[in-house]
């Protein structure tokens, strides 16, 4: 498999999932502004959407959209328990979380990356994001991870959004459950490995 990624982008989520799953993969870096690969090839020829993540399967099929990719990864390594069993009530809870993260967090971050959008408009989205983080904090009150005691692919996605919150200087210090979650996920060896491979860890 090949994971097309950009350092620190939402592709960090499936990168974490691949490492947690223990699946073999190649990592292909994408310049999202130029839509080019490191060898100069046109990324749009790989993924016409021009976005990351994209996962090229050994069959040659290309899978896009992070919430779909991470479920596919989890299903290829069922023994790692990165997603509940298909058709179970718990699997639908995972779907609920993945949809919430992608629709209510991820998409509300998008305007913050756009330099053409005025600050007063960005502040509307910042307020929305803060409200979503407060909700998640309440849901983590008695949970180590979003589904309870078991780490899942949704946790890697939420962790990626928390890294974005750091980049945009959100003050989440009052959200104690969320901060504990961030520390817990960030300390996982495979999460550390994913960030190291993407060059995201600061030198000691």
Image: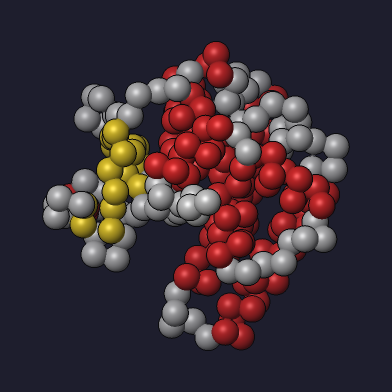
Please name the residue shown 49% across and 81% down the image: 117
Q: Which of 102 and 161 is in front in this view?
A: 161
Relative to residue 103, is residue 4 depicted above or below? Answer: above
Q: In which quarter of the image is the N terminus?
A: top left
What is the x, y in percent for residue 65?
Answer: 42, 45
Please name the residue shown 72% across and 67% down the image: 171
Give the residue at the far front of this rendering: 204
Q: How is the image coloured?
A: secondary structure
What is the x, y in percent for residue 70?
Answer: 48, 34
Relative to residue 55, is residue 178 depicted above or below? Answer: below
Please name the residue shown 21% across and 52% down the image: 37
- Whether residue 68 can be seen here: no
What is the x, y in percent for residue 118?
Answer: 53, 86
| The quadrant where residue 42 appears | bottom left
Give the residue at the far top of this rendering: 79
Relative to residue 164, is residue 201 depicted above or below? Answer: above
What is the x, y in percent for residue 106?
Answer: 55, 56
């Amino acid at each position: 498999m090949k994971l097309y990624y950009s350092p620190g982008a939402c592709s960090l989520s499936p990168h974490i999932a691949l490492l947690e799953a223990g699946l073999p993969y190649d990592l292909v870096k994408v310049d999202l502004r130029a839509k080019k690969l490191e060898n100069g090839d046109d990324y749009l020829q790989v993924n016409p959407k021009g976005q990351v993540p994209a996962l090229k399967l050994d069959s040659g099929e290309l899978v896009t959209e992070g919430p779909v990719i991470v479920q596919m990864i989890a299903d290829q390594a069922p023994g790692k328990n990165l997603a509940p069993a298909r058709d179970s009530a718990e699997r639908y809870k995972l779907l609920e979380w993945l949809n919430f993260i992608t629709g209510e967090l991820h998409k509300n971050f998008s305007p913050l990356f756009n330099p053409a959008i005025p600050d007063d408009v960005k502040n509307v989205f910042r307020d929305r994001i803060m409200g979503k983080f407060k909700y998640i904090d309440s849901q983590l009150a008695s949970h180590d991870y979003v589904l309870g005691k078991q780490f899942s692919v949704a946790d890697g996605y939420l962790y990626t959004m928390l890294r974005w919150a750091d980049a945009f200087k959100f003050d989440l210090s009052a959200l104690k459950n969320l901060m504990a979650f961030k520390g817990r996920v960030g300390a996982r060896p495979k999460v550390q490995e994913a960030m190291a491979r993407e060059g995201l860890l600061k030198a000691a």
